[in-house]
Image: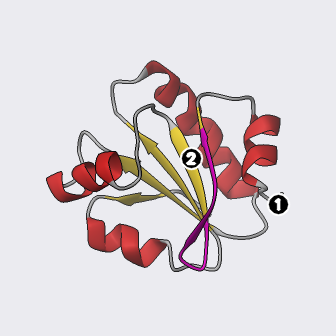
Amino acid sequence: MSVISITTLEEFEKAIQDDQAYIKVSTTTCAPCKMMNPLFEKVSEESEEGAFYSIEVDTASSELAKFAQNDLGITTVPTFFKYVSGVQDKRVSGAFPKSQLVSKLDIKL
């Protein structure tokens, strides 16, 4: 499965309702984010479950960007979330090797 881009708050709210949703929040200019993009894509293709989404806060709607900062508390990018049926289950920030990302978000490969 490939990573689906989220650009609006409505898309985010729909995405997190999946049984398992993995979301990467990043910016287009962040070096660690650029490093994690292909790794997140690879993990999405190898995953046995869940849907994978990406929010680029600098190109998202202003409503979604404000939500990411104020409601999700994004202060560092990249930040990764795992949602289970609408409830945030895991949250990690930073750049990691594949094995750590998979472990920290409990992704089944």
Asked whether, in this view, residue 94 is left or right of residue 27, the answer is right
Q: Amino acid at mark 1?
A: Lys
Asked whether, in this view, residue 51 is left or right of residue 7, the answer is right
Distance (Cα) linking label 1 and label 2: 16 Å
Image location (x, y in percent) of residue 22: 59, 59
Q: Amino acid at mark 2?
A: Phe
Residue located 40% across and 24% down the image: 30
Q: Earlier in the sequence, mark 1 or mark 2?
A: 2
User: Where the C terminus falls, by quadrant?
Assistant: bottom right
User: Which tag is nearer the camera, tag 1 or tag 2?
Assistant: 2
Q: Quick check: is 106 in the magenta stretch?
A: no
Asked whether, in this view, residue 93 is left or right of residue 57, the answer is right
Image location (x, y in percent) of residue 62: 16, 52
Identify residue for label 2: 80
Looking at this view, name the residue that lies furthest to the left. Answer: 62
Identify residue for label 1: 108
User: Where the N terminus falls, by quadrant?
Assistant: bottom right
- Badge 1, how many Cα within 10 Å: few under 14, some, many 20+? few
Q: Is residue 78 above or below residue 64?
A: above
Q: Which residues are magenta?
A: 83-92
Residue located 82% across and 37% down the image: 99
Asked whether, in this view, residue 91 is left or right of residue 78, the answer is right
Q: Quadrant of residue 100?
A: top right
Image location (x, y in percent) of residue 51: 59, 68
Q: Is residue 74 above or below residue 18?
A: above
Residue located 77% across and 57% down the image: 107
Q: Quadrant of residue 44?
A: bottom right
